[in-house]
Image (spheres, rainbow, N blue to C red):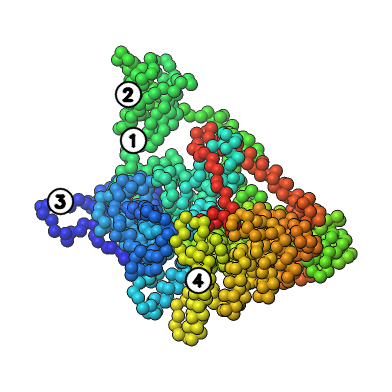
Amino acid sequence: MSLSVTNAQDYFPTDEGVKTTESTTFAFTNATIYVTPTEVLKKGTLLIKDGKVISAGASVKIPKGTKTIDLEGKTIYPSFIDIYADFGIEKPKRQSGGSRESQYEAEREGYYWNDHIRPETNSFDDFKFDAKQAKSFIDAGFGVVNTHLQDGIIRGSGLLVALNPNSTNAYRILDTKSAQYLSFSKSNKSRQAYPSSLMGAMALLRQVYNDADWYAKGNMKNKDLALEALNRNKNLIQIFETDNVLDALRADKVGDEFGIQYTIVGSGEEFERIDDIKSTNATFIIPINFSDAYDVSDPLLTQYISLRDMRKWNQEPSNLSVLAKNNINFALTTYKLKDVKSFHKNLQKAIKYGFDKEKALAALTTIPAAIIGNNSIGNLKTGSYANFIITSGDVFDAKTTIFENWVQGDKNVINDIDIKDITGNYMLYVNNINYDLAITGKGSKQTATIKLGDKKLKAKFSYSDDWISITLNDDDNFTRMLGKVINDANAIQGDAFDAEGKKSSWSASIQVKKEDETKSEMKVAEKSKEKTDEDAEEDSDDKEILVLPVSYPNIGFGNFTQPKTETLLIKNVTVWTSEKDGILENTDVLLKDGKISKIGKNVSSKGATEIDGTGKHLTAGIVDEHSHIAASSINEGAQNSSAEVTIEDVVDPNDINIYRNISGGTTTSQILHGSANPIGGRSAIIKLKWGENAENMIYDNSPKFIKFALGENVKQSRSSNGTRFPQTRMGVEQLFTDYFTRAQEYETLKKSGKPYRKDAEMETLVEILNGERFVSCHSYVQSEINMLMKVAEKFNFKINTFTHILEGYKVADKMAAHGVGGSTFSDWWAYKYEVNDAIPYNAAIMHNAGVTVAINSDDREMSRRLNQEAAKTVKYGGMSELEAWKMVTINPAKLLHIDNRVGSIKVGKDADVVLWSDHPMSIYAKAEKTIIEGKIFFDRNEDIKKREAITLEKSKLVTMMLKEKLSGGKTQAPKKKEDINFQCDTLEELKN
């Protein structure tokens, strides 16, 4: 809804008597006028009346009675637009009292069941024009802001506001419903626990959209004010705030599923995954809150700074340039800046890093106007609002002064347009003594610094009407000076007075660099262009900007070029097939087109890269059935069932543990949901393709899995906020029975042909009942293991895998009869009460009973040495070496239903293999090459080179940061980051 109230408001009653109407027609002549970023007038005229643009052109007819302002040498730009702000709207503080985890129900009646879904919020209701905040925007050149209440997952509508302090809301509010806003962050107005994770927020959004559609069709019996509002707002621009580049891709993924193209508020990290960002086809809103350099003066503290954080300081100013060069449409925002005053400084920095000025102007004017669908702002075309700034020149030049910012035809003075710019370095001559005078700043805010040799003098400086005044307190030569600017600021002359009042004359002339010095500098600049990056960095005098290259992921050990599928022939190697062929000596293996092509002796292939395997061992890549690496969140524990969430939503390709795992020979991992609730979330089965994006890591046509859990974790034995059902082991059994009964009823309704509300949670449980999704269950105690098998048999499905299963040796016969596999630890025990009966012979006993057994990690450290964990089963239980090795290759592949692709060396399977320096279960064995689908993702020789390169790069960045500090730049203190290790039985996981 837009408001169209005239500025005069002449229909309002008044008792102020007869008034003289002031002319509102102005003509600004002889200016350089940017009508749009691409339409520029030289010596043009801008004619405005009643707050609107009448005309802008080279020959505009000026009506009689118009107030004409000559802007010879000045420039006019459209005022800027900040499309993402919280101007005039106070964000609620987080509710105190009690714990978020202890509140499970919504607090509101008549609204959606989740308090963090608030599409009915109308920011107009909370808006209060903030004159002080408006001034900070106006001084920076902004004329319009798009603002909203930044609180909640679905946040409701915002409003478009002209920053006109001389008007009323009736006129300056341009639109009371400018857009609808979303995020992954919960509302501070509620302590409702769900969602407690990123994947929970994504699942909630999907369910809300499904429910809104169900409601719109008239199927809901109850009235829901939130869903009504969501349906009303669906035609508004949808703006989604994200905190990092991966979340931007996740938000776009949700939008695509429902045919919604979000406008995404980015993070400034887009350059790290620019191809993925481009593929979203989204328009972005980009903050420019660049990081300060780190204070690296203390080498002990410097070691805590990650290479990624150091790179970010160096690389992020290039983000806008990278986005522009990739033709990604984006607007700029002051969002996340501590002070709007720093906006121009940061933007100027981005321009130095290659951001085009024309595109910068578009990102502040026409693009935000187009996003919000308002063509009367962001330009100076006829009929548009008279929102414009008058500057001394290029608005993106640090030396340029913004004189005035006209908003809706009302003038706001920032710097006196009549004050000359006298900034520069002068030679000041007083009573036969030479001083250095430096004048900096803009307009009436210009300031001076005076030095006598190396001594800096305390000086008070003022400048007005071409007159300057300087007062000194610590100089014997003079105490006060008055002078006038002459010759267009090239010289200043006047009178000086000493402490006794004696008068003398003084003069100051601007210092101009000699021609030969200028030529010399030009030669240096030309020479510097020919330098290598290393030479350029060593030369502190040249000002070239060195932006370090981006790797994938953009952290230490990332790939600057991605591995390509190769034809590889590994000769004369000992092959551990994990098949009936057993171990083959002196054998050749050909990898071609990402598959295992040939196995045998004297194999040849034209054009293949040969690898000498003499004295070495080749195995299938290790498969980890139970892992928690490479995920941005692990638990959605705010409900006793979270079957609606999926780890696939939160796969984190930037996790260094991916690289560490492939360095230990692991090539496939099932990333499981945690064990906070009996029915957990869906899992992600990934190949550890270091450097690829999340989607490319997830298996194609991946088998469907879900995590269940039993025991202490789910009944919250160790939680201080354990108030959620169930609280006992028998309650856990009842919960499974209740949920599967509901799932049966849901499927019956679905099959009946009657209308039904799509429920993602129930859809998942129905897949389990139908054998389309497999259960991997966290388990320890014999009684509970028996219980879940009985519940499954009652509902006519089978448990696929018991993981942990440290009392599996007690029920191995029953497991074999049920058909469930066991994925266990080799020798973990006594880390909590319910594992007191664990024994290291567990794996062997289950195997001997006919159970398919795997050794898993559940731990990021163990997952890179599973080869040694497998070896322990030889000692504890007398397993053969081949059978022991199967426990980390083909057996977990069978449990994950991917044994047709990986887990053994067999012709036709994926070329996921590891070349070991020694017997694969030896403590001396090292993975020399880890190959996934014929691509070498880890090479030990390349790893050594990467380590050396990281050391050199950090040294280079430290030098750059030291220079930044020495040159007066801002720095931040190093921060030691908490390193959380997710596993099923840590409090970190239970806390998400």
Q: CA distance from mark 1 to mark 3?
A: 33 Å
Q: Earlier in the sequence, mark 1 or mark 3?
A: 3
Out of 615 and 783, give the one closest to the viewer.
783
Q: Which mark is residue 20?
A: 3
The image quadrant of residue 430 is: top left
Q: CA distance from mark 1 to mark 4?
A: 73 Å
Type of amino acid under label 1: Ser
Q: Which one is closest to the eye, mark 2 or mark 1?
A: 1
Q: What element does badge 4 sit on?
A: helix
Type of amino acid under label 3: Thr
Q: Mark 2 — residue?
A: 482
Q: Earlier in the sequence, mark 3 or mark 4?
A: 3
Q: CA distance from mark 2 to mark 3?
A: 43 Å
Q: Which one is closest to the eye, mark 2 or mark 4?
A: 4
Type of amino acid under label 2: Leu
Q: Earlier in the sequence, mark 1 or mark 4?
A: 1
Q: Are marks 2 and 3 in contact (CB under 8 Å)?
A: no
Q: Are marks 3 and 4 in contact (CB under 8 Å)?
A: no
Q: Are marks 1 and 4 in contact (CB under 8 Å)?
A: no
Instruction: Answer above or below: position of 279 versus 167.
Output: below
Question: Which residue occupies 42% across, 24% down?
Answer: 450
Residue 621: x and y, percent? Answer: 73, 61
Q: Mark 1 — residue?
A: 444
Q: What element does badge 3 sit on?
A: loop
Q: Mark 4 — residue?
A: 735
Q: What element does badge 2 sit on?
A: strand
Outermost residue toward the right in this view: 602
Q: Earlier in the sequence, mark 2 or mark 4?
A: 2
The number of numbered discs placed on residues in the rendered structure image is 4
Question: Which residue occupies 25% across, 50% down?
Answer: 166
